[in-house]
Image (cartoon, rainbow, N blue to C red):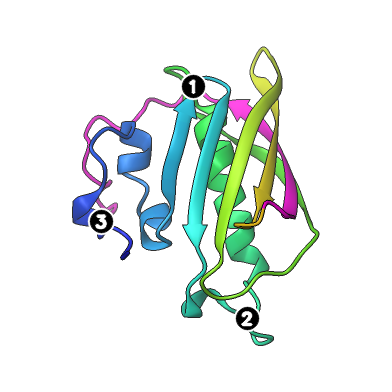
C-alpha cells in the first residue's frame, strides 16, 4: 500500500500534523494522538537506507521526534524540543515497519520530559528516545495550509 501523498493527508489530524511536510514526505502515519500519548509508524523505504543498507539513524530519530512533537503539544501552546537523546539498539532494513510509541513522563511549568520507544514489526526495540520540551509564547500558524516562505 502506497503512503499518502501530501494532498491526501488525513483531515482528522490536528493542524500541526496536517502542516508537517517532513513527516508526510517520510510516509509517517499517526495511529494514536491523545493527551500525553501518541503512536506513529513508518515503513522503511530504499531511499531511507545508509551505505550499509540499514535504516539511516537520522530517519529513526525523525520518527521518534515526530511522535515526541505530538505528545508534547497537547494543549493550545506551542511546545518545541529543548533537547533529545536517542539510543539505537537494533538495525532495520527496507520494508520493515517502525512504530514509535510515546508518552509524557513529567510536565512542570514550561518544561516537560517524554519517552519514545521505537519498535519493528516483530515488537523488538529498535531505539529509545528521551525528549525534553519547552513551551513557548509563539502562536500556532493561523491557517491549515503549509507556511509560506519568508520574502
The tag on residue 6 is 3
The tag on residue 50 is 2
Q: Are marks 2 and 3 in contact (CB under 8 Å)?
A: no
Secondary element at tag 3: helix
The single residue placed furthest to the bottom in the displayed view is: 51
Q: Residue at x 61, y 74 (%)?
A: 93
Calculate the distance from the C-alpha at mark 1 to the C-alpha at mark 3. 29 Å
- In this figure, which residue is indicated by the disc labeled 1? 137
| Highlighted magenta segment, given as a residue range | 123-151
Q: Residue at x 47, y 33 (%)?
A: 32
Q: Toward which corner of the image does residue 57 lie, by quadrant?
A: bottom right
x then y, percent, for residue 17: 37, 40
Dot 2: within a 10 Å radius of its alpha carbon, few (fewer than 14), some, or many (20 or more) residues?
Answer: few
Q: Nearer the viewer, mark 2 or mark 1?
A: 2
x then y, percent, for residue 130: 74, 40
Q: Is residue 56 depicted above or below 131 in this figure?
A: below
Amino acid at each position: 500500500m502506497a503512503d499518502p501523498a501530501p494532498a491526501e493527508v488525513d483531515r482528522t489530524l490536528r493542524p500541526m500534523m496536517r502542516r508537517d511536510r517532513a513527516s508526510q514526505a517520510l510516509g509517517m502515519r499517526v495511529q494514536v494522538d491523545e493527551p500525553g500519548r501518541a503512536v506513529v509508524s513508518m515503513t522503511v523505504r530504499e531511499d531511507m537506507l545508509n551505505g550499509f543498507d540499514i535504516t539511516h539513524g537520522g530517519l529513526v530519530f525523525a520518527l521518534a521526534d515526530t511522535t515526541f512533537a505530538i505528545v508534547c503539544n497537547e494543549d493550545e501552546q506551542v511546545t518545541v524540543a529543548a533537547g533529545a537523546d536517542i539510543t539505537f539498539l537494533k538495525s532495520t532494513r527496507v520494508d520493515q515497519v517502525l512504530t514509535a510509541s510515546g508518552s509524557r513522563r513529567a510536565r512542570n511549568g514550561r518544561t516537560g520530559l517524554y519517552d519514545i520507544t521505537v519498535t519493528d514489526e516483530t515488537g523488538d526495540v529498535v531505539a529509545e528516545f528521551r525528549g525534553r520540551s519547552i513551551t513557548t509564547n509563539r502562536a500556532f500558524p493561523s491557517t491549515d495550509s503549509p507556511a509560506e516562505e519568508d520574502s
